[in-house]
């Protein structure tokens, strides 16, 4: 007896295996997409910190920063704190997570608003 092709059971098993693999891979892929959307906002905020520090070096105060010669990226907001002694820069990503870096006396603190999503860790840092 010459049998050619696949039986219905064999085809169903293959479809089932493909479905299981897709169910495993899809959430991982969606999480990576959110991280990629957050990466742009993180980069803009990090660059804004560099620009603020560069402006500080020339004026010795954060007031007047950012200036016309080195504006911040579109969507990045800078807030001058303590009369120009400190600053905070933030940007909202495409996942609606707000990434913030604040200049403090001893360094920088990073925070984000939607922990556990995209590039924001569960401890609200990044």
Image: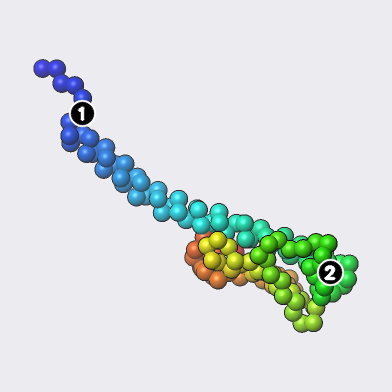
First in residue order: circle 1 vs circle 2: 1
Q: Is residue 102 shown left or right of residue 29?
A: right
Q: Tell me, for residue 101, which label it has, or none.
A: none
Residue 118 location (% of width, % of height):
52, 60
Q: Tell me, for residue 6, which label it has, or none.
A: 1
Residue at image location 84% in from the left, 74% down from the top: 61
Question: Is any part of residue 76 visible from this angle?
Answer: yes
What kind of element bears circle 2? helix
Give the color scheme: rainbow, by chain, secondary structure or one colour.
Answer: rainbow
Q: Quadrant of residue 37?
A: bottom right
Disc 1 and disc 2 in contact, CB within 8 angstroms: no
Residue at image location 75% in from the left, 76% down from the top: 80
Outermost top residue: 1
Question: Is 56 placed above or below 11 here?
Answer: below
Residue at image location 10% in from the left, 17% down from the top: 1
Question: Is 29 placed above or below 84 here?
Answer: above
Outermost bottom residue: 82
Q: Tell me, for residue 56, which label it has, or none.
A: 2
Q: Where the C terminus falls, by quadrant?
A: bottom right
């Amino acid at each position: 007896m010459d049998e050619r092709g696949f039986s219905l059971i064999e085809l169903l098993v293959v479809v089932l295996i493909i479905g299981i693999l897709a169910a495993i891979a899809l959430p991982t892929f969606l999480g990576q997409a959110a991280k990629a959307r957050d990466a742009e906002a993180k980069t803009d905020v990090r660059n804004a910190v560099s620009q603020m520090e560069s402006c500080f070096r020339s004026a010795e105060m954060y007031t007047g920063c950012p200036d016309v010669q080195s504006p911040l990226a579109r969507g990045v907001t800078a807030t001058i704190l303590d009369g120009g002694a400190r600053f905070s820069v933030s940007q909202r990503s495409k996942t609606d997570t707000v990434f913030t870096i604040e200049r403090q006396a001893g360094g920088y603190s990073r925070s984000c608003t939607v922990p556990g999503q995209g590039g924001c860790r569960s401890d609200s840092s990044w």
